[in-house]
Amino acid sequence: MKKKTISFVVRKALFVGAVAVFISPAAFFFFWMSSLALKTEVNNMAFPPVFIPNPPTLTNFQYVFENNNFGSYLLNSLIVTGGAVLIGLAVGVPAGYGIARSKLAKLAVLILVARMTPALSYLIPLYIVFSSIGLVGSLAGLIVAHLVITIPIIVWIMIGYFEGLSGDLEDAALVDGCSPWQSFLYVAVPLARPGIVIAGILASIFSWNNFIFSVVLGGKDAKTLPSAVYNSIAFEQVSWGPLAASALLVTLPILILTIVAQKQIVAGLSAGGLKDG
């Protein structure tokens, strides 16, 4: 009994140690960014480095809001990310269901290739097309551009999720008189809700953090939050305090979303890993 207890303690200690090793770089960089945001520029340039602000200051956050039109960028980000994710779900969930139920493996590989292709490679064609139809500098254009990011992610996740669901209930619904669309809407979609939540969250993260589309396609009136970080970089010098404050403010909404939806994410990942026999 003692040997089992010792073995369990050792395995748990090794697991905790491995997790600590993996998350420590991210935790350190987040702490460092927070430290830069809460210090004056003099302390940020000090050598040896000053890691703990004494006293902390909110001057950098004030500077960001006063000089970067941060509220407008935040609203644009919410509109673009929300629109791209909602449209992506409306298109991607039925597409993933159709591919999974039709067992079109080649089409699934095509979706994977689209997912792996860097978004930067779509930039020039999108700019040419948007210039000709007047979508450059508009939120509608950014939403369409972000669909390049959201739809492949959602479709790929939903293909794997629907493949893991048994089709018996859907077949029973068809026998009872439901149309294929009703079977999908009232049977498959509720069963796939955890997967839809995961797909929506991951699509939101990738869309929210996208930078290059905002800078090139957004123009002056449709820039999103990552542009606020870019505005803190000048040719003469890098203002580390405002830069770190901007990065924290950009990261905060996604961090809050992930924390709030943590249970749904775990439930979705767990359910997606179990396939019916």
Image (cartoon, rainbow, N blue to C red):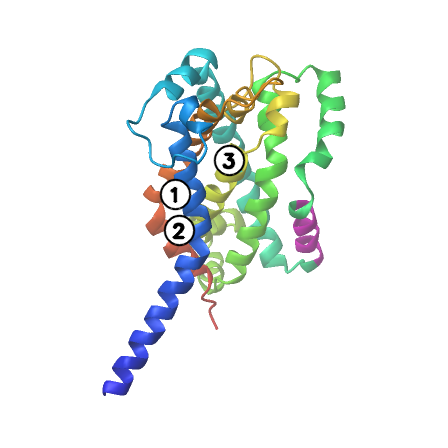
For the residues bearing labels 2 and 1, Cβ distance under 8 angstroms:
yes
Q: Residues within 10 Å of mark 1 (few under 14, many from 20)?
A: some
Circle 1: residue type = Thr
The nearer-to-camera label among 2 and 3 is 2
In the rendered structure, which segment of residues is drawn in magenta?
Answer: 106-114
Dominant secondary structure, magenta: helix
Q: Residues within 10 Å of mark 2 (few under 14, many from 20)?
A: many
Circle 3: residue type = Val
Q: Nearer the viewer, residue 109 or 212?
A: 212
Q: Which quadrant of the figure contains the N terminus?
A: bottom left
Q: Could you tell which of marks 2 and 3 lies nearer the N-terminus? A: 3
> Any mark on residue 258, and which?
1
Circle 2: residue type = Ile
For the residues bearing labels 1 and 3, Cβ distance under 8 angstroms:
no
Q: Nearer the viewer, residue 168 or 254?
A: 254
Outermost residue to the front: 48
Residue at 48% x, 62% y is 165
Task: Check residue 15 for magenta coloring.
Answer: no
Q: Which residue is mark 2?
A: 265
Q: Is residue 257 above or below residue 108?
A: above
Percent x, y of residue 159: 57, 54
